[in-house]
Image (tube, rainbow, N blue to C red):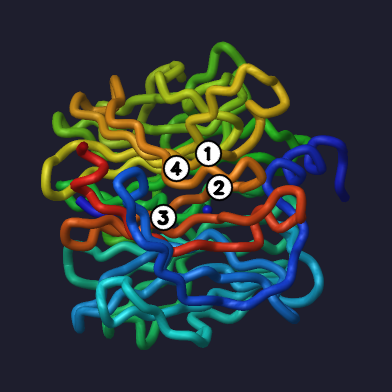
């Protein structure tokens, strides 16, 4: 298995998801490792002229040995989640050490507002699937899928992943998986729809496909008896065949839900041991060991204002399928940093990470994306 009319509610969620733009350009970086820090920043995608934000991308390994990172390239003046954006790509021919310096357009803006929040997945049949949000309005945002049979040179026509409901659905970047039996699975949060007012508290569903994405079915809604504010879910297959859903929440931790029927139904939401602000976590399985790797904001501050911040950025390993976490490492710790929306790609004995890494006081929180490499040996120390 391998691996996005304004009322008070919408403004509240937007405030939690966006930061204003800044100036700059993409730069190649190679921050040397030390005994304490085994993370090397390889590329910084800074905002620039007519490019106020670069964010929420994902990696795919191509058959010719290159890596491709596809992300949301915003254009115009605004860095809002609802501003204009297309999907752009950068390539690496040396396992992520260096990257091409110019954007290549992967998909033009086909939405009324934008296209954003990329997931890339190598299917078991060898094709590459591209998932993204097509955002038309504040009550019309649906995940779409395209297929490439020629290593991303061309793409099929888009297929909507949700056809049984209307509304504003959030599918984060790097969030779609294929189960061992071939089923495609993704998790979404619905924040608006016909007959419902916008709410920052999402209704959580999964969608699954047994025909390589040609048709999709909805799960039952994830039970949330405590009324926790839930957003931006992700999924990972466990060794016993069950599915773990990890969910951003306002409960001071990441929340969990489990499915034992391949994503059709889910257990009641429960609190995990991953202390967290209202910020998403990414959890994926480490190919070499079978353990789980989490990257998230391990914000333990007792100051309630500091505890809301998306800093530091941390990693931890679970040897018991997400029940407990150990080897907690700090990846980034700028107190003014804003680290979130993490994509992972395991490359040899290292893991590539793509994540938002702007500066909160400067208003560039979601505008900057870092591509960094982390030593797996260090993560296990």
Find disc 3 in the rendering and name its residue. Answer: 343
Find disc 4 in the rendering and name its residue. Answer: 187
List x then y, in percent, for residue 220: 45, 30
List x then y, in percent, for residue 78: 79, 66
Residue at x-position 37% and y-position 39%: 315
- Image marks 1 and 3: residues in contact by CB distance under 8 Å: no
Find disc 1 in the rendering and name its residue. Answer: 312
Q: Marks 1 and 3, Cα distance to the nearest angstrom?
A: 17 Å
Q: Marks 3 and 2, Cα distance to the nearest angstrom?
A: 12 Å
- Image marks 2 and 1: residues in contact by CB distance under 8 Å: yes
Q: Marks 1 and 4, Cα distance to the nearest angstrom?
A: 26 Å
Apparent side of residue 83 relative to residue 227 in the rendered image (left or right): right
Instruction: Return the disc, 2 or 1, that comes first in the chain's sequence.
Output: 1
Q: Is residue 252 visible?
A: yes
Query: Marks 4 and 2: which is nearer the front?
Result: 2
Residue at x-position 52% and y-position 69%: 44
Query: Marks 4 and 3: which is nearer the front?
Result: 3
Say what secondary structure mark 1 lies in: loop
Number of residues whose C-alpha sits closer than 10 Å to that of mark 1, classed few (under 14), some (14–19) or many (20 or more)? many
Find disc 2 in the rendering and name its residue. Answer: 339
Query: Marks 1 and 4: which is nearer the front?
Result: 1
Q: Name the residue furthest left.
A: 288
Query: Marks 3 and 2: which is nearer the front?
Result: 2
Residue at x-position 49% and y-position 46%: 332
| The quadrant where residue 203 appears | top right
Say what secondary structure mark 2 lies in: strand
Say what secondary structure mark 4 lies in: strand
């Amino acid at each position: 298995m391998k691996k996005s009319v304004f009322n008070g509610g919408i403004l509240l969620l937007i405030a939690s998801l966006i930061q204003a733009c800044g100036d700059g350009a993409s730069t190649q970086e190679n921050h040397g490792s030390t005994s304490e820090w085994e993370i090397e920043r390889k590329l910084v995608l800074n905002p620039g002229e007519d490019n106020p934000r670069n964010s929420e991308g994902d990696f795919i390994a191509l058959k010719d040995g290159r890596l491709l990172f596809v992300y949301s390239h915003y254009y115009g003046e605004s860095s809002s989640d609802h501003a204009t954006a297309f999907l752009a790509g950068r390539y690496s021919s040396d396992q992520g050490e260096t990257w091409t310096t110019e954007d290549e357009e992967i998909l033009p803006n086909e939405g009324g507002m934008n296209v954003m929040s990329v997931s890339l997945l190598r299917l078991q049949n060898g094709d590459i699937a591209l998932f993204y949000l097509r955002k038309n309005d504040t009550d019309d945002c649906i995940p779409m899928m395209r297929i490439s049979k020629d290593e991303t040179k061309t793409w099929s026509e888009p297929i909507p992943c949700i056809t049984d409901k209307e509304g504003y659905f959030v599918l984060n970047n790097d969030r779609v998986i294929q189960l061992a039996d071939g089923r495609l699975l993704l998790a979404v949060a619905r924040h608006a729809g016909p007959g419902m007012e916008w709410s920052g508290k999402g209704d959580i569903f999964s969608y699954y496909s047994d025909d390589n994405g040609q048709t999709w079915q909805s799960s039952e809604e994830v039970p949330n008896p405590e009324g926790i504010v839930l957003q931006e879910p992700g999924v990972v297959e466990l060794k016993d065949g069950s599915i773990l859903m990890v969910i951003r929440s306002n409960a001071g931790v990441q929340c969990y839900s489990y499915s034992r029927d391949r994503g059709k139904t889910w257990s009641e939401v429960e609190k995990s041991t991953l202390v967290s602000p209202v910020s998403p976590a990414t959890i994926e399985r480490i190919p070499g060991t079978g353990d789980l790797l989490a990257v998230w904001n391990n914000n333990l501050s007792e100051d309630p204002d500091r505890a809301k911040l998306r800093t530091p950025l941390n990693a931890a390993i679970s040897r018991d399928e997400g029940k407990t976490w150990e080897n907690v490492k700090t990846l980034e710790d700028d107190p003014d940093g804003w680290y979130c929306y993490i994509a992972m790609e395991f490359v040899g004995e290292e893991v590539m990470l793509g994540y938002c890494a702007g500066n909160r006081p400067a208003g560039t929180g979601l505008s900057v994306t870092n591509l960094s490499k982390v030593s797996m040996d260090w993560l296990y120390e």
